[in-house]
Amino acid sequence: MAKTVIVSKAKKTFFQGGEETYVLRGVDFSADSGELVMIVGPSGSGKTTLLSVIAGTLRCDSGSINIFGETLSNLPEDKVTAFRCSSVGFIFQQFHLIPTLTCAENVSIPLLLNGWKRKPALEQAKAMLAEVGLAEKINFPPKKLSGGQQQRVAIARALVHNPKLIICDEPTSALDADTGSKIMEMIRAHAKASDRTVIVVTHDSRIFRFADRMVEMSDGQISQMVSHV
Ligand SMILES: Nc1ncnc2c1ncn2[C@@H]1O[C@H](COP(=O)(O)OP(=O)(O)OP(=O)(O)O)[C@@H](O)[C@H]1O
Ligand SMILES: [Mg+2]
């Protein structure tokens, strides 16, 4: 298996109100193609921050992030953005759906950013929404959907362009056990079928069984491997 994600000695400090918070304290982490890795750990331990530096939405202060052979810190901002558009699907902890667009329009965004024409992009988005069980909601704005339905729209948007790296921040937090399992099965099947890399941050022990490997983050470091349940 090829190593597709290599994080080496990553450090990140936030400054706020004159105080420094050392959020990543020299994180070493890697993931392979075809692998689903779960990251668990207490609230505030730096999990979302780590996902953000891997996705290139946040730069770390030192250390290196290498994704598919590219070292993100060596790339200019526009190249990082282009890499993210083509190769990363990100399911945000807070969903980040655009309220003025329909669900299908939200899901079509990654395709439009990758040069698809509007009509085929919308058709593909509708097919993806049907896969997550939301065929009935394609023309609804997100605010007319329940939390769990909005989360499924966010999942559809992350997968629609078949990215090589899928990053999920608490992907099942708003879902009931049955829907959460179905969604994880879908993400896992999707990843295995085309050798994608999936990194999932979760507190949800109901989905631990979908992991190939689990690591624990605490106090800004990947502190230990925990056995997979
Ligand atoms: N933009 C920011 N500015 C200042 N501090 C930040 C910022 N983003 C995160 N932090 C701080 O960094 C620490 C880690 O935050 P992070 O969101 O990575 O934690 P987390 O492990 O994802 O937590 P949770 O499980 O609650 O989502 C927290 O103390 C948080 O307050
Ligand atoms: Mg978080």
Image (cartoon, grey):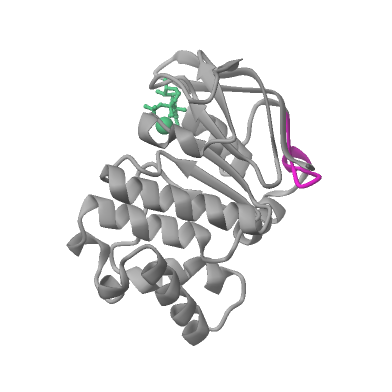
- For ligand 1, the image quadrant comes to top left
The front one of 30 and 76 is 30
> Could you tell me which residue is drawn at 35 percent across and 46 percent down?
180
- Residue 212, percent from left and from top: 59, 35
Of 74 and 211, nearer the camera is: 211
Quadrant of residue 227 in the image? top right
Q: Quadrant of residue 18?
A: top left
Q: Residue at (48%, 44%) from the top-left corner?
A: 168
Q: Residue at x 26, y 51 (%)?
A: 148
Residue 192 in view, yes or no? yes
Q: Above or below — where is 171 with respect to 88?
A: above
- Does 195 sit left or right of 111 as displayed? right
Q: Position of residue 37 (x, y in %)?
A: 58, 35
Direction from residue 6 to residue 141 in the image, left or right: left
Q: Magenta segment: does it hold 43?
A: no
One can see residue 204 in this view: no
Residue name at image x 31 percent, y 67 percent: 134
Where's the N terminus, which quadrant? top right
Q: Is residue 36 left or right of residue 149?
A: right
In the rendered image, the vertical position of residue 204 relative to residue 106, given as above or below: above
Q: Residue furthest bottom?
A: 119
Q: Which residues are magenta?
A: 64-74
The front one of 113 and 120 is: 120
Q: Give left or right: position of 146 versus 90.
A: left
